[in-house]
Image: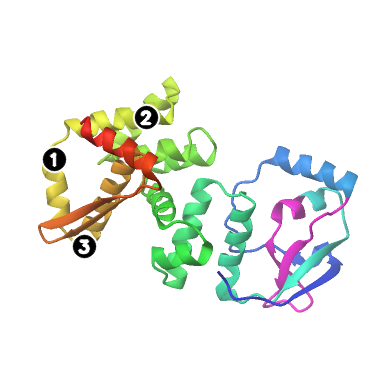
Amino acid sequence: MAEPVSEEMLNIPLERISLNPLQPRKHFDESKIIELSKSIENQGVIQPLVVRVHPELSGHYQLVAGERRLRALKMLDYQEIPVLIRNIKDHDLLETALLENIQRENLTPMEEARSYQNLLREHGYTQDKLAERIGKDRTTISNLIRLLQLPESIQNDVELGRMTSGHARALVSLPSEDLQLLLRKQLLQQEWSVRETEKRVRQILGKLPQAGIKKSLDGSSEEKKQMLLNLEEDLQRQLGTRVGIRHSGKKGEIRIHYQNLDEFDRLYSLLKSR
């Protein structure tokens, strides 16, 4: 995680706080803001906003975390508010804001995915290094970032709650945008569950020529990496456990993980029956 930072608690004029330009959260539910403002009106500000000294404006501050509370306080015409001032460098601003939002489960899956992608790009992290720094499983990060490959309409569906990230993860396994949009239309119209969507995706993939897998594994390193991630996720969905695939040249190995003997028995029975 980001390096430890010094902190100071103060009351400062609300007008001196500017928004975080790297705020991971882009979508705010107005009804939730109104609900929060009523809570603050009754109970006061229980948790201070997190800010840092503005890097360019003397005497001003930049929000790090707490934009929902800031919006609610503006509704209530607060003039001065309690804040926690942290000494956060530009380099750590996005990471700190992301962690604050993740810990409060404030981000949509797409906001989280874009934040991870930005951290990978801006900091030069590998997915393994990013997972270590923010305390998330690498597979979770990888699966979310893959959602950014989907058409914008499907990303918007996830953003607005018309479908879950589970639906979207199933659709991203399809090899073309046309197929993804076709199934999107069907799942929204017929209100498929995630399980039903996964089933339909497997049916489609089962009818496609399997030469595509061999071609991808023989292709560029990026193409091979993406295909291995797709195959890992497909096996994980079918087996209900973590799966790792290592491929080199024409050979490789598949590792199936289990937590205890009961899970081993379940996996053994499942594989034996196929």
The C terminus lies in quadrant:
top left
Q: Secondary structure at mark 1?
A: loop
Report the side of 109 relative to 6 (left or right).
left
The N terminus lies in quadrant:
bottom right
Viewer-side residue, 42 vs 31: 42
Residue that label 2 marks: 197
Q: Earlier in the sequence, mark 1 or mark 3?
A: 1
Which color scheme does this rendered protein use?
rainbow
The kind of residue on which mark 1 rests is Gln
- Residue ID at (58%, 49%): 107
Report the side of 246 relative to 149 (left or right).
left
Q: Which residues are magenta?
A: 44-71
* Residue 37 in the image: above or below residue 1: above
Label 2 neighbourhood size at 10 Å, few (<14), some (14-19), many (20+)?
A: many
- List x then y, in percent, for residue 43: 88, 47
Cα separation between marks 2 and 1: 21 Å
Residue that label 3 marks: 221
